[in-house]
């Protein structure tokens, strides 16, 4: 990983009045550019073999400049050129995924957020250690498949967007579905409603809801549309489907805005606060946008099955605000909130506190 001192040295040469906000042209880039433009930043799209014409359809989300690279090796090698332009990178799920977490960590360009978090969330065991030691409930793990006595979800390590995951209700179903060539974990299938809670933690501010040494905001909540599980019920029972060779999958295809009942908010904030506090104890903290991917049971208990420690695509329905963000800064998206934070840090000469 690039040493923090190296990034701080690069930042010392940055013109704080001429920062360019850049990201990979995918995922939540429209929202990031739209938010950055609102705050008066210049914007840059970075692209590798991606059709970027769709930006023409959305002038307010179109980056000022698009830089094209043959591949991620070239992007990596041209880091000095980006540093010369005062670029601050905003990581999103596809950026880290396509570039590869390792290479992303070694990229010599200031990045918003803490790069150390990458290894904590990309390893399911380390992520579990972080969440559970924070005192936040997760779905139970089942160590031995022969002990399956309730519905479980079998998750392959490194599966993207739940591809290949499958549900089993007993050992026989497990045996029928398992691919032993891939590492996997077996997890209690939590029956309940899914909420993907989008928070923003600012270490630069103490307004509003005070958490750790800064302030915690809830900006929005979404639920993911997942194919084909969401529509499978229309064809009858899953057992029946399996006989026809049709298995449920969890591939994300879109996002829908939701709100949770108000009485769940204290629990949601409590979980987020604990996770932030623990992250500072374990690896120097998470700040900025993060998402707790959760299921609420009929006992009104949250179980968190994953954390995303950066902007998630589930914030995209809220480019012009959300029922929650509108009570903080009307019309503010997560992309705009990121830009506000960078603007504040630049104005107060505190960029090293939020870039790594
Ligand atoms: P991504 O990295 O895109 O978030 P992933 O491959 O890490 O996906 P998860 O987010 O862990 O996969 O899970 C994918 C989907 O499976 C969830 O969105 C949810 O619908 C479902 N899911 C995950 N864990 C559970 C669980 N324990 N009980 C019930 N459903 C679950």
Image: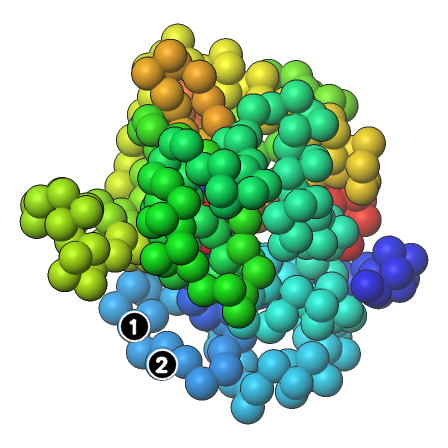
Name the residue: 9% across, 45% down: 236
- Asked if the residue under mark 2 is in contact with the one under mark 1, i.e. CB atoms within 8 Å, the reply is yes
Q: In which quarter of the image is residue 74?
A: bottom right
The answer to whether one can see residue 281 in this image is yes
Frontmost residue, 147 versus 339: 147
Q: Kindly report the distance in space between the C-alpha atoms of the residues bearing marks 1 and 2.
A: 7 Å
Q: Which residue is labeled 1 in the image?
A: 54
Tell me where residue 290 appears, x and y as whole percent: 56, 40
Q: In this view, does 67 lie above or below 152?
A: below
The answer to whether one can see residue 109 in this image is no
Tell me where residue 134 appears, x and y as whole percent: 69, 25
Density class for disc 2 (Cα within 10 Å; few <14, some 14-19, many ≥20) is few
Density class for disc 1 (Cα within 10 Å; few <14, some 14-19, many ≥20) is few
* Left or right, residue 267 beside residue 111: left
Q: Quadrant of residue 220?
A: top left
* Left or right, residue 221 beside residue 269: left
Frontmost residue, 356 versus 186: 186
Frontmost residue, 85 versus 164: 164
Q: Which residue is labeled 2 in the image?
A: 51
Q: Quadrant of residue 162?
A: bottom left
Q: Quadrant of ligand 1?
A: top left
Name the residue: 65% across, 29% down: 132
The tag on residue 166 is: none
């Amino acid at each position: 990983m690039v040493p923090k001192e190296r990034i701080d040295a690069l930042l010392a040469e940055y013109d704080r009045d001429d920062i360019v906000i850049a990201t990979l042209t995918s995922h939540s880039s429209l929202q990031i550019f739209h938010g950055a433009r609102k705050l008066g930043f210049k914007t840059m799209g970075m692209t590798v073999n991606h059709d970027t014409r769709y930006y023409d359809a959305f002038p307010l989300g179109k980056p000022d400049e698009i830089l094209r690279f043959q591949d991620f090796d070239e992007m990596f090698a041209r880091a000095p050129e980006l540093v010369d332009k005062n670029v601050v990178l905003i990581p999103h799920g596809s950026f880290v995924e396509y570039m590869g977490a390792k290479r992303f960590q070694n990229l010599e360009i200031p990045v918003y957020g803490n790069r150390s978090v990458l290894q904590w969330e990309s390893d399911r065991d380390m992520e579990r250690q972080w969440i559970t030691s924070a005192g936040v409930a997760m779905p139970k793990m089942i160590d031995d498949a022969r002990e399956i006595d309730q519905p479980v979800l079998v998750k392959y390590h490194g599966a993207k967007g739940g591809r290949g995951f499958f549900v089993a209700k007993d050992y026989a179903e497990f045996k029928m579905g398992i691919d032993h060539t891939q590492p996997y974990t077996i997890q209690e299938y939590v029956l309940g409603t899914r909420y993907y809670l989008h928070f923003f933690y600012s270490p630069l501010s103490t307004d509003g809801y005070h958490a750790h040494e800064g302030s915690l905001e809830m900006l929005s909540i979404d639920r993911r549309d997942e194919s084909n599980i969401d529509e499978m019920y229309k064809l009858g029972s899953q057992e029946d489907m399996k006989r026809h060779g049709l298995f449920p999958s969890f591939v994300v295809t879109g996002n829908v805005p939701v709100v949770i009942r108000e009485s769940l908010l204290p629990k949601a904030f409590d979980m987020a606060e604990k996770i932030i506090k623990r992250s500072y104890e374990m690896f120097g903290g998470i700040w900025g946008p993060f998402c707790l991917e959760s299921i609420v049971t009929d006992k009104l208990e949250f179980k968190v099955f994953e954390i995303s420690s950066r902007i998630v695509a589930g914030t995209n329905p809220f480019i012009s605000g959300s029922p929650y963000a509108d009570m903080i800064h009307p019309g503010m998206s997560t992309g705009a909130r990121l830009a506000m934070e960078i603007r504040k840090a630049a104005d107060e000469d505190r960029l090293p506190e939020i870039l790594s």
